Amino acid sequence: MQAYLAGFGLGLSLIVAIGAQNAFVLRQGLRREHVFWICLVCSLSDALLIGAGVAGFGALTARVVWLEPVMTWGGAAFLLVYGAMAFRNAWRGGEVLEAAGQGGQSLGRALATCLLLTWGNPHVYLDTLVLMGAVSAPYDKLGFAAGGMSASLVFFFSLGYGARLLAPLFARPVAWRVLDVLVGLVMWSVAFSLLRGQF
């Protein structure tokens, strides 16, 4: 359960950041266009990448013994910095998610756009293959991966189908400040749990 919750918390905190993919999902949800398929593609893409990151990193650490502690410390350092950046963004404020866009589009075009925004984003590889894989090192791999995959599934379907409810809220900068604080807290809590296991 600890591995699942760590994977869920980290996966959720990485995915909620303002970005083109989330804006696209929100926009499709607002229009109620192909919401199920868009959310499914985003979730499955994340699941594939998280699974590859956790499995690949586990196989590598079995061969290179010193890699796990190095990556654990590195992952914790990254999470502390990332969390600090989230707190800084909350302090500064001013973030607003623009959900408005062009008119409707076909399912094929919507899926192509979704795949491009998902797989064409270099940060997705850092977040899933590298960071999720590295942070998973001290945890049960299956539980951690399941937590990360669940976070993606919950987030995208909640965003897509809850878009009409969320749009007015996240048009206000204060909502993003609260979100940034929550992201920072999750990042730091995962970082401290990693470091606690090193002592």
Image (tube, rainbow, N blue to C red):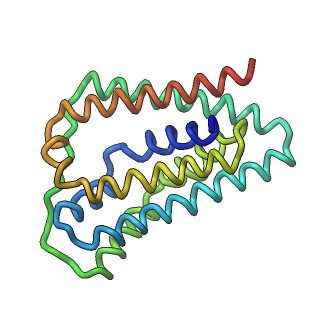
Q: Is residue 61 left or right of residue 165?
A: right
Q: Is 111 drawn above or below residue 157 in the view shown?
A: below
Picture quadrant where residue 66 is located = top right
Q: Quadrant of the C terminus?
A: top right
Q: Residue at x 16, y 75 (%)?
A: 104
Picture quadrant where residue 107 is located = bottom left
From the top left corner, tell me how far across and down residue 151 is, in percent: 47, 48
Farthest residue toward the top? 199
From the top left corner, tell me how far across and down residue 100 is, in percent: 14, 58
Q: Is 46 drawn above or below residue 78 in the view shown?
A: below
Count how many numbered circles sit on residues in the image.
0
Work out whether residue 156 or residue 91 is closer to the camera in this orientation and state it.
Answer: 156
Q: Residue at x 41, y 69 (%)?
A: 115
Picture quadrant where residue 171 is located = top left
Q: Quadrant of the N terminus?
A: top right
Q: Is residue 18 left or right of residue 168?
A: right
From the top left corner, tell me how far across and down residue 42 is, in percent: 42, 63
Q: Residue at x 20, y 67 (%)?
A: 32
Q: Is residue 69 left or right of residue 124?
A: right
Work out whether residue 35 or residue 78 is closer to the camera in this orientation and state it.
Answer: 35
From the top left corner, tell me how far across and down residue 119 is, in percent: 46, 64
Work out whether residue 143 or residue 174 is closer to the camera in this orientation and state it.
Answer: 143
Q: Is 1 drawn above or below residue 194 in the view shown?
A: below
